[in-house]
Amino acid sequence: MTVLKEQISKLPDTPGVYRYFDIDNELIYVGKAKNLKNRVSSYFNKSANHDQKTRRMVSQIDRLEFTVVNSEFDALLLENSLIKQYQPKYNILLRDDKTYPYLCITNEPFPKLIPTRHLDRSLGTYFGPYASVKTMHTLLEFLRKLYTIRTCNLNLTQKNIEAKKFKVCLEYHIGNCKGPCEGLVSREEYDKNIDQVKNILKGHLNPAIQHFKEQMQEAAMDLAFERAQEYKEKLSLLEGFQSKSLIVNPNISNIDVFTIASDDKNAYVNYMQIVDGSIIHTKNALVQKKLDESEAEILSHIILGLREEHQSESKEILTNASLEIELPHISWTIPQIGDKKKLVDLSLKNALYFKRDLTQKKEQKGEVLAEKGKRALVKLQQDLQLKVLPTHIECFDNSNFQGTNPVSAMVCFKNGVPSKKDYRHYKVKTVEGPDDFATMHEVVTRRYTRLLNENAPLPSLIVIDGGKGQLGAATQALKELGIYGQIPIIGIAKRLEEIYFPGDEIPIHIDKKSESLKLIQRIRDEAHRFGITFHRDLRSKNTMTTQLFDIPGIGPETANKLLTLFKSVKKLREATMEELTEAVGKSKAQKVRDFFEGEG
């Protein structure tokens, strides 16, 4: 911490981005600052009124890095880039588990217009994302009625066309394509249509409307009435499409609307993109709060990302919350009256509906899970012929690797779901060597001795991961404690998923599709995972401690201190002399340094 404080004191009074790392050298937070020294210092100011989550983050900071930039906006750009790249655990992120559909105009001679969910800007110009596949396909069908865009995958280079490699297909004969494969339409004429498609996809309908009017009038003057009728029908299509999408004042053009509603844990953002008086894109986004971020902070973080995603070129932003940063060449306002205020109200209404829907879905999901869990418990009670519903289940599992570091784990499920605050790890104290039965006896004894001493509630079912031997050892422990018979206890053997009862030589077989067996398996698997994780960590620490004991002049106290600070031999080996000195003093730091340099 001394090194960190010294580094903070030397930070410049300039805009920049700072990055916090924990003791495992993992990036945990990225922040921007108008003044690096003031912003970073504020985290470590004891008088600052930080919330609990911020205090937790600060307690994990082991070192920092920073980058100086020219302006606060440059800091915002760099911050967004780093958050996207590294996704630090204390930074807010847009939660978006969907892959939205796009329309792409391909980069090739005689481009195609294709739907896709794969975003690769090098392949073409993308428009979207669209809120639904139906919306995207409706627009695609509309554009193909207006313009004759090819749908084939032929490589229409000038060389291939001149060599007459291709023949027109059915699409040409039914009027859906003008036959670029045989050179029946010029590249220039085709590209004019593609330019019109781009305008419509960007929301600019007026150039396309004007184009069809001119073509219709020109055809009429040439007495080409059939051609004029075709243009008239296309014009009607386009004007009909415009009337459906025109929902605001047509004088309001090229504006982005961002509104936000929030609760203690999440923020709910709505984005609307307005072009020529029409809403051409809208999106709801969920943002999970990591620290005590204000609505202004959250909006400032995500505006750039959403604008980039929707390729917005708007120079004006309407919002219901102040932004904490100035965006170059872009103005923002919180309108109080008029059509712009109505737009913000409409966007906020969407954000509030989004918040309500997610909250209801979460509640319904919780109710469904609770109902499913209760159903599994009722079935388990029936299958095991238990007197009471097993709402509190505890499961034990032993773990060792080639006879080393024997440990045990206990997981707890309440009402059919994990109660992780009640999970327990046990280092085996009285058993030497790999003895599963004695280990199970010890940890069961320790667990229920403690519950009895604390007058805490006992479980309504105990599950032992193992066959008759482990079950017998656990049963003996309960007998010695005088509680055998008060708590039902079973063992589950891995090979055939058989369920054993104490003293019963013949196991019972529960239907493999039964919810009750699936619940027992889930509890058993969770105990195994929990135990294996603890065993792996313990083995790693023991290996490191053994290596540290090999260093001349390093005793158990110093070894444990180094273990706590650096977590692994790799991190210790990579530590600087300054970091080692701060941890254990110059003399011992030199011994550690010499030892590892001698190894290399």
Image (cartoon, rainbow, N blue to C red):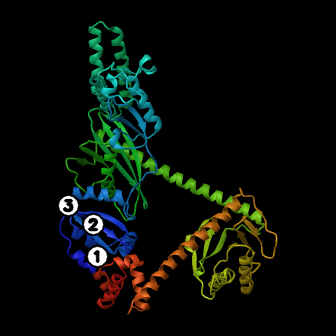
The answer to whether residue 329 shows anywhere in this view is yes
Q: What amino acid is found at the position of numbered circle 1 in the picture?
A: Asn
Q: Position of residue 492 (x, y in %)?
A: 71, 69
Instruction: Looking at the image, tell me whether mark 1 or mark 2 is earlier in sequence order.
Output: 2
Question: What secondary structure is found at the residue carrying circle 3?
Answer: loop
Question: What secondary structure is found at the residue carrying circle 2?
Answer: strand
Alpha carbons under labels 1 and 2: distance apart: 17 Å
Residue 102, located in which quarter of the rendered image?
A: top left
- For the C terminus, which image quadrant? bottom left
Q: What amino acid is found at the position of numbered circle 2 in the picture?
A: Tyr
Q: What amino acid is found at the position of numbered circle 3 in the picture?
A: Val
Q: Would you name the residue on which mark 1 appears?
A: 45
Q: Position of residue 491 (x, y in %)?
A: 72, 72
Question: What secondary structure is found at the residue carrying circle 1?
Answer: loop
Q: Would you name the residue on which mark 3 appears?
A: 69
**Mark carried by residue 18:** 2
Q: Is residue 141 above or below residue 317?
A: above
- For the N terminus, which image quadrant? bottom left
Q: Are marks 1 and 2 in contact (CB under 8 Å)?
A: no
Instruction: Looking at the image, tell me whether mark 3 or mark 1 is earlier in sequence order.
Output: 1
Position of 517 compared to 26: left or right? right
